[in-house]
DNA sequence: TAAGTATTTTAGACATGTCTAAAATTATTA
DNA sequence: TAATAATTTTAGACATGTCTAAAATACTTA
């Protein structure tokens, strides 16, 4: 139906649209896809011809409803496969992304319908990210970054922002995973670092960590 | 590691080597892959440079050990995924081939190791075809075509030769699947048709059907 | 607001894998 | 064994998606 390249561009633009407001710039797409801006221009023009996005020269791209639906379906597949890999094949949550990058391009509606059912129609992937429904609708959850909490506030970990392997392994070492309760015991304003309580352990985390953990306040 | 096209060519040549003896011809590859002979020549020359096969101009191709291993691993993946689709996702055996054609190209040794374990290390796929082990070794089973049986011989259905959807649905209608016991009640020499007993039903089958069902004689 | 900088696009090239048409080789058969 | 037929290869083209280098446009800032 759609090529691998098309799906990857639409997915990247979809994610970028959620990070900022307005059009997505050529450079932003290039950076997120680790490709050159000139390649992005080429592809964005093709996607515009196919009505998957609106493109204004020198201004950037914005997904159409059609483009958004395709992107959401690719993301749905990615996240369902991640659930499969962790829940059924017992992969660790830091190992599944690259495999899901490949599996997300398998074309079969029936496959995804059945996979979803097999997995018990999960709402979130192993990193706490919401799984779009079959119509491409993403439940927005009220989550905030741990760094936004003030001293003595409590939250439940509901996801990670960047899910690179090193970071996920760090979280494991600190016994933090989806569902873990975290209490802010101290917060330094000049560097954003915090002291937090996890279970019975109290320890220091850097701003970088606090800005990559999503929590729901309690 | 290897491109989609490379894997598909190696797989096709692997299957053709098991159907005939000696080199595999350009035309045979082209026909089995539904492509043009000129395209086959191009690709076969590239695969020869990469030492995946031995190619002699105007003579044909023969897989090297390297090529055979790659092909067997693709076939292993194809058949394991078919088992997954039928056993876990409850697909019907006539629906899984096209999806497995895509899944067989997913690159991850760890994924296949875990999938195999998850499925209980099956020896055969849903169509009765043997699954190569992780070293690319294919157990050869003694099976013959139903058409080779004589009157009053009995056999257990262990596989199908062509697994196209129409044929598999015909078998379903006749209540024949892997494991079904079949008794030959009559055989016409001039057209190869047979009368067979399946459970309590006795009925006529054409030569075409008899030549596409593998049995193990009892 | 004009010069300098950053961003974006275009032009032209390249890699992969496909095709058609024509040429080369091999196989068939009279 | 020479003509004819079938198979296979080559030459040249095309589609997709990428890149570098240069040109065009937009944005800063003095
Ligand atoms: Mn992921
Ligand atoms: Mn994820
Ligand atoms: Mn198959
Ligand atoms: Mn099969």
Image (cartoon, coloured by chain):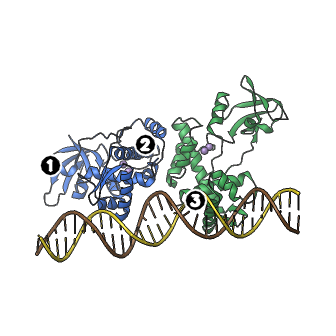
Chain colours: A blue, B green, C yellow, D brown
Looking at the picture, tell me which residue is in the foreground, A153 or A34.
A34
Q: CA distance from mark 3 to mark 2?
A: 33 Å
Where residue A197 sits: x, y (%)?
22, 49
Res A150 label? 1
The residue to which callout 2 is attached is A87
Helix, strand or loop status at disc 2: helix
Q: What residue is at 34 percent from the left and 61 percent from the top?
A: A30
- The chain ID associated with circle 3 is B
Q: What residue is at 19 percent from the left and 55 percent from the top?
A: A194
Res B52 label? none
Is A89 placed above or below B52 here? above
Is B152 placed above or below B47 here? above
Helix, strand or loop status at disc 1: loop
Helix, strand or loop status at disc 3: helix
- The chain ID associated with circle 1 is A
Split into quadrants, the picture shows ligand 3 in the one at top right
Q: Is mark 3 within 8 Å of ligand 3?
A: no
Q: Is residue B81 toward the left or the right of residue A134 in the image?
A: right
**Residue A58 makes an appearance in the image:** yes
Classify mark 2: residues with Cα within 10 Å, few (<14), some (14-19) or many (20+): some
Image quarter of residue B148: top right
Is D3 placed above or below A135 here? below
The residue to which callout 3 is attached is B6
Tags 3 and 2 on a common chain: no
Q: Residue furthest top?
A: B200
Where residue A193 sits: x, y (%)?
19, 57
């Amino acid at each position: 139906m759609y090529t691998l390249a098309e799906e990857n561009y639409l997915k990247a633009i979809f994610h970028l649209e959620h990070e900022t407001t307005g059009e997505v710039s050529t450079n932003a797409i290039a950076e997120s896809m680790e490709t050159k801006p000139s390649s992005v221009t080429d592809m964005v023009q093709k996607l515009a011809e196919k009505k998957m996005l609106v493109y204004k020269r020198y201004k950037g791209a914005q997904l159409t409803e059609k483009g958004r639906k395709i992107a959401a379906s690719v993301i749905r597949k990615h996240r369902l496969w991640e659930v499969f890999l962790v829940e059924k094949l017992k992969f660790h949550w830091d190992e599944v992304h690259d495999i899901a990058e490949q599996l997300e391009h398998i074309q079969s509606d029936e496959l995804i319908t059945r996979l979803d059912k097999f997995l018990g129609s999960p709402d979130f992937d192993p990193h706490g990210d919401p799984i779009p429904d079959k119509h491409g609708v993403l439940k927005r959850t009220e989550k905030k970054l741990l760094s936004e909490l003030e001293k003595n506030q409590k939250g439940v970990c509901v996801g990670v922002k960047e899910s690179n392997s090193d970071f996920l392994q760090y979280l494991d070492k600190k016994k933090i995973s989806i569902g873990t309760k975290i209490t802010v015991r101290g917060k330094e304003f000049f560097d954003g670092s915090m002291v937090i309580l996890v279970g019975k352990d109290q320890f220091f985390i850097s701003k970088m960590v606090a800005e990559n953990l999503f929590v729901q306040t309690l």
